């Protein structure tokens, strides 16, 4: 379980960096990345799922600890 959480955090950070890079490169004058809005939308959705998993796991552990 701990390994999954650790990998999830790294994947979340990596996807966030990729998303920011895509948006920054696309903003440069004369550079256009096709479908960048759709790509960043999918990355954002995946980030939301991973973040929800991590927060849910944290809430469950906190509840178990307080019992």
Image (cartoon, helix red, strand yellow):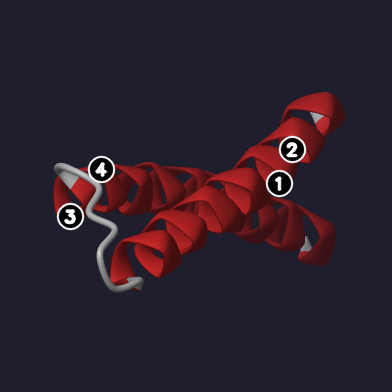
Residue at the disc numbered 4: 39
Q: Which residue occupies the foreground of this view, 38 or 12?
A: 38
Crowd rating for badge 2 (residues with CA inside 10 Å; few <14, some 14–19, many 20+): some
Q: The residue tagged with tag 2: helix, strand or loop? A: helix
Q: Is residue 57 visible?
A: no
Q: Are marks 1 and 2 in contact (CB under 8 Å)?
A: yes
Marks 1 and 2, how far apart at CA: 6 Å
Sequence-wise first label, 1 or 4: 1
Looking at the rendered image, the quarter that the C terminus falls into is bottom right
Q: Which mark identifies residue 9?
A: 1
Q: Residue at x 73, y 42 (%)?
A: 10
Marks 4 and 2, how far apart at CA: 24 Å
Of labels 3 and 1, the one closer to you: 3
**Could you say where residue 13 lies in the image, as x and y percent from the top left?**
65, 52
**Could you say where residue 20 lies in the image, as x and y percent from the top left?**
48, 63
Crowd rating for badge 4 (residues with CA inside 10 Å; few <14, some 14–19, many 20+): some
Q: Is residue 24 visible?
A: yes
Q: Which residue occupies the foreground of this view, 17 or 56?
A: 17
Crowd rating for badge 1 (residues with CA inside 10 Å; few <14, some 14–19, many 20+): some
Quarter-of-image position of residue 65: bottom right
The relative height of residue 7 versus residue 29 in the rendered view (above or below) is above
Crowd rating for badge 3 (residues with CA inside 10 Å; few <14, some 14–19, many 20+): some
Residue at the disc numbered 3: 37
Sequence-wise first label, 2 or 3: 2
Q: Are marks 4 and 3 in contact (CB under 8 Å)?
A: yes
Sequence-wise first label, 3 or 1: 1
Of labels 2 and 3, the one closer to you: 3
Of labels 1 and 2, the one closer to you: 1
Q: Which residue occupies the foreground of this view, 50 or 13?
A: 13
Residue at the disc numbered 2: 5
């Amino acid at each position: 379980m701990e390994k999954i959480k650790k990998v999830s955090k790294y994947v979340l950070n990596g996807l966030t960096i990729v998303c920011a890079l895509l948006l920054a490169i696309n903003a440069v004058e004369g550079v256009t990345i096709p479908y960048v809005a759709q790509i960043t939308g999918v990355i954002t959705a995946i980030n939301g799922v991973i973040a929800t998993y991590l927060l849910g796991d944290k809430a469950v552990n906190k509840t178990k600890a307080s019992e």
